[in-house]
Image: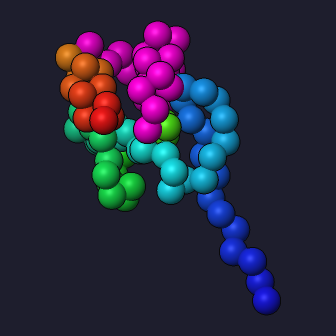
């Protein structure tokens, strides 16, 4: 019996490897917008983050979204994402 390989991704905030299904995907679309990807299948450059708000704030504070997406991100977009992530 073969065991299936579980895809692992690194959280931008805590820098820990976790199963892909446990993380939220944030995507920079080909049009240049940055959005939360609830399906995990949207086109564009993706970055993963825990659903924990502290991980999100750490990633913002240390400019990890800018590094991952290779563009500057509008603070309004980051505030909108924070609102979607918070419980």
Magenta span has 45? no
Query: Looking at the figure, which quarter contains the N terminus?
Result: bottom right
Residue ranking furthest to the top: 61
Q: Which image quadrant for residue 51? A: top left
Residue at 54% x, 29% y is 12
For the image, the number of numbered tags is 0
Q: Is residue 41 visible?
A: yes
- Viewer-side residue, 80 vs 68: 80
Magenta span has 71? yes
- Residue 44 screen position, x and y as percent: 36, 45
**Position of residue 5 in the picture relative to residue 22 (left or right):** right
- Viewer-side residue, 19 vs 42: 19
Q: Is residue 19 above or below residue 34?
A: below
Query: Looking at the figure, which quarter contains the C terminus?
Result: top left
Q: How is the image coloured?
A: rainbow
Residue at 38% x, 39% y is 26
Q: Is residue 40 above or below residue 56?
A: below
- Residue 4 screen position, x and y as percent: 69, 74
- Residue 76 screen position, x and y as percent: 20, 17
- Residue 50 screen position, x and y as percent: 49, 37
Residue ranking furthest to the right: 1
Residue ranking furthest to the front: 87
Q: Is residue 70 visible?
A: no
**Position of residue 17 in the picture relative to residue 76 (left or right):** right
Residue at 46% x, 32% y is 52
What main secondary structure does the magenta stretch of the protein show?
helix
Residue at 66% x, 35% y is 16
Report the magenta residues as a range. 51-75
């Amino acid at each position: 019996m073969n065991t299936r390989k579980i895809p692992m991704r690194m959280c931008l905030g805590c820098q820990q490897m976790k199963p892909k299904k446990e993380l939220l995907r944030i995507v920079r679309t080909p049009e240049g917008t940055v959005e939360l990807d609830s399906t995990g299948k949207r086109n564009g450059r993706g970055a993963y983050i825990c659903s924990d708000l502290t991980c999100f704030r750490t990633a913002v504070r240390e400019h990890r979204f800018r590094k991952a997406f290779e563009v500057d991100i509008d603070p309004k977009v980051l505030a909108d994402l924070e609102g979607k992530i918070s419980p």
